[in-house]
Amino acid sequence: MADGTPARAASLRRRHAEDGPTEKEREYLEVIYYLAARNEPVIAARLARWMGVQPPTVAHVLKHQLEKKGYITRNGRGEITLTPDGFTLAEAVVRRHRILERFLVDVMGIPWHLIHEEAVRLEHALSPTLEARIEALVGHATTCPHGNPIPGMCDTYPGDVCLDAAQVGAVFTLQRIVEEAEEDSALMRYLQTNGLVPGARFAVTDTSSAYGVTLQAGNQSITLSPEIAGVLWGEVDARA
């Protein structure tokens, strides 16, 4: 240990663990970023539903961790806004996550239903050097495999029509799957198995508020529940 390298490495590991947001705080910042980017209400109740926790848990994290560290502010109506520091951190997390998902699918050949959790495991340990190498491997991708934009590569969410609002006779081109759905591995497997991937085109042959939406592509017909139709966004062509 003459050159002190092991000691310096241990010090760096400790400092990395102490500085910046915790893994749980990063998760909250990521969800806040998603909601804000989609122009959806960013309030504690919405975070609790997304993350599957009780409202008091969210309230504690917001007040005693994220606000205390200067990552968010809240107004009198309880609406949450990322501070410049919070936005920078959240955007970096989202960018790494989506680049990693692209790498896992395009380069490693990992199935859809596995990539979200694998990206979560990897993203917090990804150095800027490794991130740049991985980004080079995925080329000029602008979205993750599920169609959501990679910050710095794409500024807007593709697809402005939710499938549950498409009319019978329209042609629906799937553009993206909302972020919440990515956490449901069974749903991701179902969508990929049935060709419900960004770029796929389907004719809308039937709709029902109770039973969902029926799609037709060639000889394939599939009826999706209202819940699944509600997480699929794309573009519609009025041609039958």
Image (cartoon, helix red, strand yellow):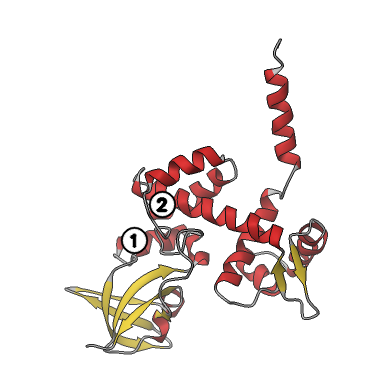
Tell me which residue sits at (78%, 76%) in the image. 75
Tell me which residue sits at (64%, 77%) in the image. 41
Relative height, residue 53 to residue 115 (above, below): below
Amino acid under disc 2: Arg
Disc 2 crowd rating (10 Å Cα; few below 14, some 14-19, many 20+) is many
The residue beneath circle 1 is 192
Instruction: State which quadrant residue 142 falls in.
Output: bottom left
Q: Nearer the viewer, mark 2 or mark 1?
A: 2
x, y percentage for residue 84? 69, 62
- Which of the two residues, 204 or 148, is positioned nearer the viewer here? 148
Q: Element at badge 1?
A: helix
Task: State if disc 1 and disc 2 touch (CB < 8 Å).
Answer: no
- Which of the two residues, 193 or 33, is positioned nearer the viewer here? 33
Amino acid under disc 1: Gln
x, y percentage for residue 107? 35, 44
x, y percentage for residue 118? 49, 47
- Which of the two residues, 13 or 129, is positioned nearer the viewer here? 129
x, y percentage for residue 185? 45, 57
Tell me which residue sits at (68%, 64%) in the image. 53
Q: Quadrant of the C terminus?
A: bottom left
Q: Element at badge 2?
A: helix
Instruction: State which quadrant residue 89 falls in.
Output: bottom right
Q: Quadrant of the N terminus?
A: top right
Disc 1 crowd rating (10 Å Cα; few below 14, some 14-19, many 20+) is some
User: Residue farthest to the left?
Assistant: 219
The residue beneath circle 2 is 102
Residues at marks 2 and 1, CA–CA distance in whole angstroms: 15 Å
Task: Give the left or right position of residue 157, taking residue 36 as reference.
Answer: left
Which numbered disc flags the more N-terminal residue, 2 or 1? 2
**Rendered image: mark on residue 75:** none
Task: Give the left or right position of residue 69, taking residue 26 as reference.
Answer: right
